[in-house]
Amino acid sequence: MRRHLVIIGGGAGGASTAAEAKRIDPDLQITMIEQGKHVSVAACPMPYFVGDTIKQEHKLIARTPEAFRESGVDVLLKTRVERVDTDQRRVYLSDGPEIVYDRLLVATGASPILPGIPGQDLDRVYTLRSLEEAIAIKALVQSGCRRAVIIGAGFIAMEMSDALTGFGLDVRIAHRDERPVTRWGVEFTERLMSTFAERGVLFMPKTTISRIDQNADRSLRLTTNQGEIETDLVVIAIGIRPNVTLAKAMGLQLGDSGAIRVNLSQQTSVANVYATGDCTEVYHRVARRWVNVPLGDIANKQGRVAGQVIGGRPAVMPGIVGAQSFKFFDLELAATGLGEQEAVRYGFHPVSATAWAPPTAPSMRQKEDIETGLKLIADQSTGMLLGAQAVGRRGAVQKIDVLSATLWYEARLDDLASMDFGYAPPFGGAWDLIHIVSRLLLKKL
């Protein structure tokens, strides 16, 4: 008899598992169950779709249900899993007969964190966690919406402020903390604040929302500790948490992060059950801990590993170093590894240094050149690099990509201080910014 793989969830983790498992074992029977209308949706480009950089919604779909079915993967849309009996290996659906499995993959993703206030479920209040929401926001903006409030100030909030401002909207960011995107150190806050001012985005620090009401014309009124705000659109972007309701009911072990605990081959604590994506933990090579980092590239890598293992080929997910980047108007922001507070929490003794430099050599410097800032964090006891952050108009992501590679192989500061880079005047000075900050930091050890 053919083996049967049942996948719960059609996001990046589930879809990539299905594709890889079918490639390894073409005879494998696969059923993918998704409670939404779409599978294999790329969530990370959604702000660029809202902002009309990506014109067509189908470009956010990596693979359609029809394409999966043509490859032999059965896809059930708008179907919810009610419960799973892991002893009998049966999946019970909200609509239809139960399904018997040989292998089961849990890829239930993450759910948005909501502020828990009256009105958070009103019309024109969104969380941007689905393609349907992205389509609705874009339609509303294109129909003449003129004002928007974004609750939260993480990287999705930053990308959405860019997207909405591009349509000429009056955009406000209401944030309970003093600074946006706090993964990036206070050294970079001034650059972000000046960008807000230049682009007409009003950043409202230390602002809490107590309720949202709808006016007669369908516009919204927010009651805050800073007074009332009238707006046409609200985007809640205060974070997400792993969706583990089903996993807990199944008896799957959760890790310290609250996500599903897996091993390097994506196997859970229950036999024949695997998990991938935003609902799972992943091994952080710098922290040497299992953490939850809900990013699409991680979900895809985990899915490939799970698909290979389920298909019969040994594989492991070697972990992450915590690399992340996003675009904010004309700025690149990127980070990798650990910040100082994280480093202390994981038992290190962090020390840091920051420097700024133009993106070209002095001989080619132009008046309009904006300096790139780079911060390095190292362990004072060992000299090991722990993390890095960068902000700039050009080259910030490239710096972090280089430093992610060095973190992967446990580089020391003295390695970075003399590392060989591709030098040419259009791309920087003879001493790269990485060299400069490494040497500054070595003096602190």
Image (tube, grey):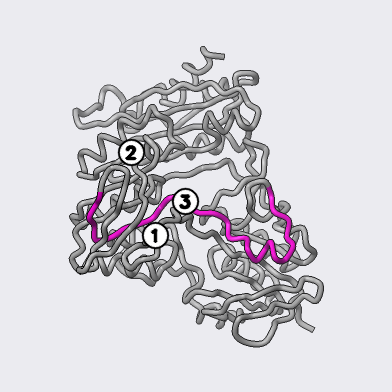
What's the residue type where badge 3 is placed? Gly
Whole-angstrom CA distance, mark 1 to mark 3, is 19 Å
Q: Position of residue 164 (x, y in %)?
A: 26, 55
Q: Residues within 10 Å of mark 2 (few under 14, many from 20)?
A: some
Q: Residues within 10 Å of mark 3 (few under 14, many from 20)?
A: some
Whole-angstrom CA distance, mark 2 to mark 3, is 17 Å
Relative to 434, is 103 on the left or the right?
A: right
What's the residue type where badge 1 is placed? Pro
First in sequence, mark 2 or 1: give its number: 1
**Label number found at residue 239:** 3
Q: Which residue is mark 2?
A: 205
- Element class at badge 2: loop
**Magenta region, residue range:** 228-255
Q: Position of residue 418 (x, y in %)?
A: 52, 21
Disc nearest the viewer among 2 and 1:
1
Relative to 249, is 427 on the left or the right?
A: left
Q: Position of residue 90 (x, y in %)?
A: 74, 78
Q: Which residue is mark 1?
A: 118
Which image quadrant is residue 379 in?
A: top right
* Along the line of sight, the residue nearer the viewer: 214 or 110: 214
